[in-house]
Each structure stands twice: as C-alpha cells, then as structure tokens.
C-alpha cells in the first residue's frame, strides 16, 4: 500500500487550538528533515475542542495548507478528525484526510453472542499456545479467555467499522488514513489481547494504519509520564511485536504502527520509545497536541506587556472556573489544588516568574505541574477573549512561534525520532 494517503514511518500529531501556529510547528518538522529524519505533521483537533472554542475543522485545514505553501513543504501532511464518533464525524468529512475512530464508549459493552461465536470459529489459532515472534515466552490461552476479550472489544470494533464505512461512502476508498483509539479503557492490553483486537479489526476489514492501545501508567495532559518506565518499555516493545505479527498473519497494512495518545511532554519514556523503534525497525505516531497552546501562553507571558496581562487573565479564569474546565478532562489530569498559587499572587508576577512556573522544565524549582495542567485545560478562557487573544498572538508571533518550534523540536522530535 503506497499512495498519498499512506502514513509514513514517523509522524507527530500537532494540535493547534487557535490555528495560529501551523508554520511554527511545521518549522520543527523542517528542522528534523535537515537532521536527516522525516517526521510528518498531522494537525489534529478534536470535536470537543472545536465545540469549546467555536471553531470548525475547515479552519484547521486552511491553516495547515497555508503553512505548507508558505514554507514549501514537499513531504506528506495530514489533518486529523481527532476522536470522532458516528455522531460527530460529519463536520470533519470534507476537510480531513486522517480519522481517529474513537470507540471508547463501546469498549466493555457486551458484544452480540453470535459475533463472539463467529470470531472464535474463525480464529482457532488464538486458542492454546500463542507464539508471537520476538516475545520470548508463548502466551497460553483458552476459549474462555479469548471469548472474554472478544466480548469486551468486539462491539467497539463493530462501531469502528460503521464509522469507517460511512467515511468511505462519503470520501471514497483509500482517500484517508484510519486510526483506531483503544486507549480509553480500564487496563492496558496484553500483547495477546492486542493480537485478538487486531484480528477482529482485520475481520471488520478496516485497513488501519495506526492503533492507540492503552499503556500502563498515567498519561496526564501536558505533564510527564507517571508510572513504571521499565514496564512501559516492555509493553511498548511487545506491542510492536504483536503488530508486526498481526500485519503478516491477518493482512493488515504493512505500515501499521503504534500511536501514543497524550504523548506530549512524556519525557521520561521518550528514550524507551526511540530505542524500541530502532530495535524493531518500526514507526510510531505521537500526539503532542496540547503543548502548543501552553507554549502560546508562555510566549505571551515572555513578551510582557499586554501578553503577560493576558497570560495572567487566562490563569485567573482557569482558577475561578476550575471545576467546569477540569470536568471533561477528569481522567487525564491530576491537579493538586493545594499547590496552585492564588490569582492575586500571580497578578504580581514578572514574566520570568510566570514562564518558570508554566514551562515544562523539571530542573527549575519554580516549575509547577498542577499550575501547568490547569492552564492546559483553560484554553476556553482565551476563546472567550475572542479577537483580543488572537490579536496578541499576531502581535507577538515571533516570540510565541519560537517557543512553539523549540518545544516541539527540542523536547519532542529530537528525543523520540533522533534519539538525542
């Protein structure tokens, strides 16, 4: 499979809440190309974010196209309908060419008994001793185990099939990149569970190019990974092995790769990811969306003047509306409210005090992960400022863009894709 809708080996999900940083993000990918590695930008913005801000997917597309034209980018790039369902897909159909099928609500819903029976009948190879090349120990399963996994995930995969076929009907076969998100579930999938899921996806005839499984540990928004790094590394490698095996066994696309959701700022696992990619000669898609918004706020604060005033207002608004803002993100944030400074205190801060508290530099004693997470979910406050916020981005384009590019290239692309 190789056409313009084939996702290359390395790709990075770059979100942009206000469609102002596409050039700054693309500049990071251009820097990577100069260093000898092709990292493809995938601009993603979820229906939830569009709804909160009052934007349309067509604006994401327009910003991406404009950046590509302005900077002369000749490699592929995509616009992702991030976390869409049957109910929300319509507004994304025309502007998007990458669709993250979100079936989280269906995971765990009992599948139709006849679907489970059919799956077991088609896949006797999944029962008994299952050997996955490059995983030392074989997995021992029985009918009850496979039935249980199928019962947990088949309804979700059927749902993904319905979304996929609707997109094909409206856009045409082979005219987009499909991804399935399986990360919003209770427990990490074992390699054999992932193999069962991939077999079911192949049965459903969804030619997925990336899959986002659930990994051990917490992937909170905008802050570092919380968990056992060695355990993550083991799971990541075993998932690569399971995918490689499933591609050969079930005829899934040859470029199928892992997708790491909420992958931004997970600095402590980037070496593990890089080492695994080298070891398995594999690709990866890493979503780093939310950090761009945080870098915008950092850039405005660094600029001083009205930029700093706006940054402080964002914090005050987020602090005063914390309950409402945190609710949609409750499972992916972990804020210690006792460690949040009062807005009155922040109002007296210098640019350096604000940026030191917000910028993700763990060597800086002022860095505050609770402060950072609260600002992360506070983008609605900036949306309410309307043109005032957007004007501040335009006026301070250089300093904001520098922060966006540096963050994406130095802190994300270099360690993941270049191993530096």
Image: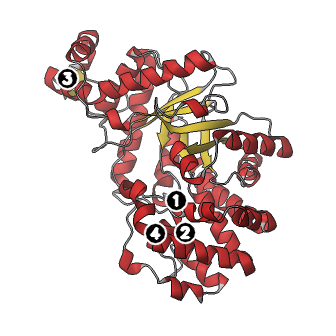
Residue pointed to by mark 1:
265
Residue pointed to by mark 4:
321
Measured in 3D between alpha carbons, the distance from the residue under mark 1 to the one under mark 2, in whole angstroms, is 8 Å
| Residue 207 seen from this side | no
Q: Which of marks 1 and 2 is nearer the N terminus?
A: 1
Q: Earlier in the sequence, mark 2 or mark 4?
A: 4
SS at mark 4? loop
| x 66%, y 79%: residue | 309
Q: Which colour scheme is used?
A: secondary structure
Q: Which mark is residue 147?
A: 3
Q: Which of marks 1 and 4 is nearer the N terminus?
A: 1
Residue 244 placed where, x, y %? 44, 27
Labelled pair 1, 2 in contact (Cβ < 8 Å): yes
Residue 117 placed where, x, y %? 21, 13
Residue 51 placed where, x, y %? 55, 48
| x 35%, y 28%: residue | 156
Q: Earlier in the sequence, mark 3 or mark 1?
A: 3
Q: Which of marks 1 and 4 is in front?
A: 4
Q: How crowded is mark 1: few (under 14 residues within 10 Å), some or many (20 or more)?
A: many
Above/below status of 130 relative to 360: above
Q: Residue 360 carries which label?
A: 2
Measured in 3D between alpha carbons, the distance from the residue under mark 3 to the one under mark 4, in whole angstroms, is 45 Å
SS at mark 3? helix
């Amino acid at each position: 499979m190789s056409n313009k809708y084939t996702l290359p080996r390395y790709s990075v999900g770059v979100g942009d809440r206000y469609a102002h940083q596409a050039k700054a993000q693309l500049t990071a990918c251009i820097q990577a190309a100069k260093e000898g590695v092709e990292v493809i930008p995938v601009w993603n913005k979820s229906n939830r974010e569009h709804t909160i801000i009052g934007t349309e997917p067509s604006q994401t597309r327009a910003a991406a196209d404009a950046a590509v034209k302005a900077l002369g980018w000749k490699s592929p790039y995509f616009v992702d309908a991030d976390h869409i369902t049957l109910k929300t897909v319509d507004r994304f159909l025309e502007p998007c060419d990458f669709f993250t099928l979100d079936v989280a609500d269906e995971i765990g819903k009992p599948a139709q008994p006849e679907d489970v029976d059919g799956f077991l009948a088609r896949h006797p190879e999944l029962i008994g001793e299952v050997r996955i090349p490059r995983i030392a120990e074989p997995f021992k399963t029985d009918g009850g185990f496979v039935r249980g996994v199928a019962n947990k995930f088949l309804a979700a995969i059927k749902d993904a099939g319905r979304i996929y076929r609707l997109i094909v009907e409206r856009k045409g076969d082979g005219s987009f990149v499909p991804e399935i998100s399986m990360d919003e579930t209770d427990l990490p999938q074992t390699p054999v569970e992932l193999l069962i899921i991939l077999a079911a996806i192949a049965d459903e005839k969804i030619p997925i190019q990336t899959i986002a499984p659930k990994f051990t540990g917490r992937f909170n928004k905008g802050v570092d990974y919380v968990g056992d790094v060695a355990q993550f590394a083991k799971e990541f490698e075993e998932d690569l092995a399971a995918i490689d095996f499933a591609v050969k066994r079930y005829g899934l696309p040859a470029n199928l790769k892992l997708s790491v959701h909420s992958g931004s700022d997970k600095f402590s696992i980037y070496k593990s990811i890089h080492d695994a990619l080298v070891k398995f000669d594999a690709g990866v898609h890493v979503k780093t969306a939310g950090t761009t918004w945080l870098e915008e706020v950092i850039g405005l604060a660094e600029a001083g003047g009205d930029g700093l005033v706006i940054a402080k207002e964002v914090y005050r608004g987020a602090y005063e509306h914390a309950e409402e803002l945190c609710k949609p993100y409750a499972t992916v944030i972990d804020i210690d409210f006792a460690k949040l400074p009062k807005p009155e205190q922040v109002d007296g801060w210098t640019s350096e005090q604000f940026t030191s508290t917000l910028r993700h530099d763990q060597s800086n004693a002022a860095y505050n992960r609770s402060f950072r997470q609260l600002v992360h979910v506070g983008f609605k406050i900036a949306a309410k400022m309307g043109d005032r916020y957007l004007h501040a981005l335009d006026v301070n384009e250089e300093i904001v863009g520098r922060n966006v590019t540096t963050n994406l290239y130095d802190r994300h692309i270099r360690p993941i894709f270049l191993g530096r």
